[in-house]
Image (cartoon, helix red, strand yellow):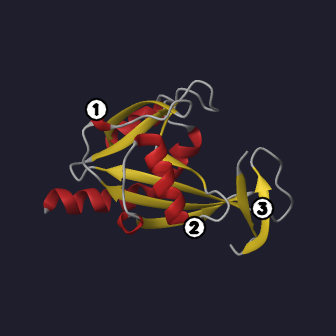
């Protein structure tokens, strides 16, 4: 059983917690974190959602819901480690933006990490594949419906930020 902090519309913790899987009440929000891992050579790491998950078989970046008591950097560090085996210090994650929908605040990060694909450790029940792709390949995957639709929209809104980081690393 997983519990999440409940935030108000101004992103303040209410002191109450929510059980994952239960409906959210009016004016209640959770925190979801996402990270774009990039290699500094023009590629981004994607993982494939396991068959038992919603949007099964589609590709995405790492992320998930913050557990009760976690801030966004603690949550993204945990999620990335769980889903890929990649270890990073909280200070290594670069905040690139936030968003909000009906019942969630989203915090988006990026992390530069050039790691061979064979060193990625997938989380059974969460992820069943991983690959490095270029930003152009992500556009092609979106057009073919291979990227989780929620992640597709997030990618398109954050692509400029990712491109800035990729270009600064490639030029260096």
**Direction from residue 64 to residue 114 in the image, left or right:** left
From the image, tell me which residue sits under label 1: 118
Whole-number angstrom distance, CA of label 2 to CA of label 3? 14 Å
**Total residue callouts:** 3
Image point 24% across, 38% down: which residue?
116
- Between 92 and 45, the residue placed more toward the observer is 92
Above or below, 29 relative to 125? below
Above or below, 110 relative to 51? below
Ranked by sequence position, the earlier of labels 2 and 3 is 3
Q: Farthest residue in the front direction?
A: 1
Image point 36% across, 52% down: which residue?
87
Numbered tag placed on residue 17 in the rendering = 3
Report helix, strand or loop for mark 2.
loop
Classify 10 Å Cα crowding around label 1: few (below 14), some (14-19), many (20 and above): few
Whether the residues at callouts 2 and 1 have beta carbons within 8 Å, the answer is no
Classify 10 Å Cα crowding around label 3: few (below 14), some (14-19), many (20 and above): some
């Amino acid at each position: 059983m997983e519990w999440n902090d409940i935030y108000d519309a101004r992103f303040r913790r209410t002191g109450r917690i929510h059980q994952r899987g239960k409906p959210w009440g009016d004016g209640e929000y959770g925190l979801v974190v996402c990270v774009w891992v990039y290699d500094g050579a023009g590629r981004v790491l994607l993982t494939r959602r396991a068959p038992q998950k919603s949007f099964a078989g589609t590709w995405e970046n790492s992320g998930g819901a913050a557990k009760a008591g976690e801030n966004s950097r603690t949550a993204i560090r945990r999620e990335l480690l769980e889903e890929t085996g990649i270890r990073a210090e909280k200070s290594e994650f670069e905040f690139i933006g936030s968003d909000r929908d009906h019942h969630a605040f989203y915090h988006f990060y990026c992390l530069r990490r050039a790691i061979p694909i064979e060193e990625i450790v997938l989380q059974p029940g969460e992820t069943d594949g991983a690959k490095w792709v270029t930003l152009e390949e992500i556009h092609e995957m979106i057009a073919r419906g291979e990227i989780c639709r929620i992640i597709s929209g997030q990618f398109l809104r954050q692509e400029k930020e990712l491109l800035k980081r990729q270009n600064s690393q490639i030029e260096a």
